[in-house]
Amino acid sequence: MAVTVHKIERYSVQVLNKRTGEQPKASIIVHLFNDQGAGCGHAVFKAYGDLAPEPPTGDQTAGTATAYYDIDFYQPFADILRLEDELYWKIEWRKIGPRDEVADVSLDTKEEVIGEFFSKLLEE
């Protein structure tokens, strides 16, 4: 699987309150920017209730991805953004027919990225 890794230099947070039906629905979008200042992805937090979040989406040509999470996970995600010095937005791609789709998206610390790299070397 191909992997795209962006070092996160800054982020912005957008809080939305959308009325759909009887109850308003809140969502939080975290916009992630790499070390060149370009947008590299989004983490979208919504109240899914008993439903599963939609799968991640992305554009391999641009190297960007959007991941969807239940709103209950926003606080731990925000804590990681605030507390860690070096963070990476890692996107794994899988080939499906003629196009590549997002297989997995993760927010990783430097230690996780280095650990994965060296563990793969040891497997070879």
Image (cartoon, rainbow, N blue to C red):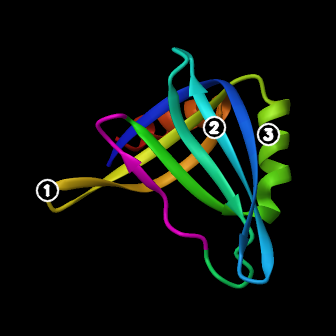
Q: Which residues are magenta?
A: 53-62
Query: From mark 3 to mark 1, how far is it between C-alphas?
Result: 36 Å
Residue 89 image point, x, y percent: 56, 37
Query: From mark 1 to mark 2, how far is it between C-alphas?
Result: 29 Å
Query: From mark 2 to mark 3, how far is it between C-alphas?
Result: 15 Å
Residue that mark 1 sits on: 98
Is 93 above or below relative to 19? above
Q: Nearer the viewer, mark 2 or mark 3?
A: 2
Q: Nearer the viewer, residue 91 or 19?
A: 19
Q: Nearer the viewer, mark 3 or mark 1?
A: 1
Quarter containing the C terminus: top left
Task: Confirm whether the magenta stretch covers residue 56.
Answer: yes
Tell me which amino acid carries mark 1.
Pro
Is 65 above or below relative to 35? below
Q: Residue at x 48, y 55 (%)?
A: 104
Tell me which amino acid carries mark 2.
His
Residue 78's quadrant in the figure? top right
Horizontal arrangement in the rendering, residue 104 relative to residue 42 (left or right): left
Is 40 above or below relative to 48? above
Q: Residue at x 56, y 16 (%)?
A: 35
Q: Residue at x 79, y 39 (%)?
A: 80
At numbered mark 2, what does the secondary structure look like: helix, strand or loop?
A: strand
Residue 62's quadrant in the figure? top left
Q: Earlier in the sequence, mark 1 or mark 2?
A: 2
Q: Earlier in the sequence, mark 3 or mark 1?
A: 3
Is 112 above or below relative to 95? above
Residue that mark 3 sits on: 80
What number is the disc on residue 31?
2
Horizontal arrangement in the rendering, residue 100 relative to residue 56 (left or right): left
